[in-house]
Image (cartoon, grey):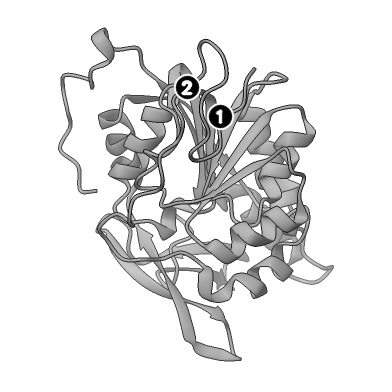
Amino acid sequence: MRRPPKPGEKPHGKGHGPAPKAPRPAAPGPRTDWSGVAEWYDRLVGEEGSEYHREVVHPGAVRLLALRPGEPVVDVASGQGALARLLQNRGAEVTGVDAAEPLIRAARERGPDSVRYHVGDARDLSFLPAGYFAAAACVLAIQNMHPIAPVFQSVSRLLRPGGRFVLVMMHPCFRGPKETMWGWDPETGVQFRRVDRYLIPRKTPITTHPGSAPDVYTWSFHKPIEAYVRALRNAGLLIDAIEEWPSHKTSEPGPRAGAENTARKEVPMFMAMRAVKAATQGGSEPRRRVTSVT
């Protein structure tokens, strides 16, 4: 399987996609990349990802992507490349894209050179070849993006018919920042998850240096599950799998440990969706579109 060319590079041989164009200016909407906290985030995530990446998110994403050796995959919002390196080590041909230039620089420094990284906005991936990729991933990043419709449309353009798109996020129902929290019922001995808001879309500032730099923050955009389903459908990406993943952690021994562990298993921390690019007549968009709040 051939690699996509670098920006400005001419295609090599029959069947290769067009040479990527230079990225356009950022798409409309708030800029929410992590350029301002790239060094902190790189230290936090490290070579192989955080503990949650290693134990839950990356194994699940790799399984849902179901990549065969040599298949081209694009990691959208690749950050400093933890997932991209894992996919490359498993034999895939990997391209990573992130809007934060410092994180892309860190990814390139970590290597390997066979992973191709680009600075680019996930809402406009027109600099990459259309119909080239067998799969795409967006892991723990979509809730930092708004609007999401152009992201999914861009991903759909990159995928071959039948190509897979794996989307992983904090669970929209149970992990809304500042609107959901753990609670304890002393009468029943039950650890529960309280949900104060869910259906109405909103944005929330997230402090990236808690305690040390309260004025440094990025935005998290909450949307209900139906918004993701509609935006995927409108981009010609049809969901064939939804999985809900709990935390892998267990509580230290104590009077509430059993209830805490039960609640942790019952209330998922992450939600993953896999969508497949639908084949359309003449390469057109699906005829029927669904009204979306995105």
Q: Splitting the image into 4 quarters, where does residue 71 fall? A: top right
Judge from the rendering whether residue 200 lies leftward or rightward of residue 10; answer left or right: left
In the picture shown, does residue 37 fall above or below 284? below
Which residue is drawn at the image coordinates 59% and 56% (left, top)? Answer: 79
Depth check: give the residue in front, 197 or 50.
Answer: 50
Q: Are marks 1 and 2 in contact (CB under 8 Å)?
A: yes
Residue 186 is situated, as x and y percent measured from the top left of the image, at 59, 73
Which circle marks residue 17 in the picture? 2
Tell me if mark 2 has few (under 14), some (14-19) or many (20+) residues whose alpha carbon lies within 10 angstroms of its own. Answer: some
Can the viewer see residue 38 in this picture? yes
Provide the secondary structure element on which disc 2 rests: loop
Q: Which of marks 1 and 2 is nearer the N terminus?
A: 1
In the picture shown, does residue 216 fall above or below 257? below
Task: Give the amino acid at mark 2.
Answer: Gly
In the rendered image, the quadrant that contains the N terminus is top right
Depth check: give the residue in front, 198 or 129.
Answer: 129
Judge from the rendering whether residue 197 lies leftward or rightward of residue 175; answer left or right: left
Residue 68 is situated, as x and y percent measured from the top left of the image, at 69, 18
Provide the secondary structure element on which disc 1 rests: loop
Judge from the rendering whether residue 4 lies leftward or rightward of residue 110; answer left or right: left
Residue 223 is situated, as x and y percent measured from the top left of the image, at 32, 53
Instruction: Identify residue for label 1.
Output: 4
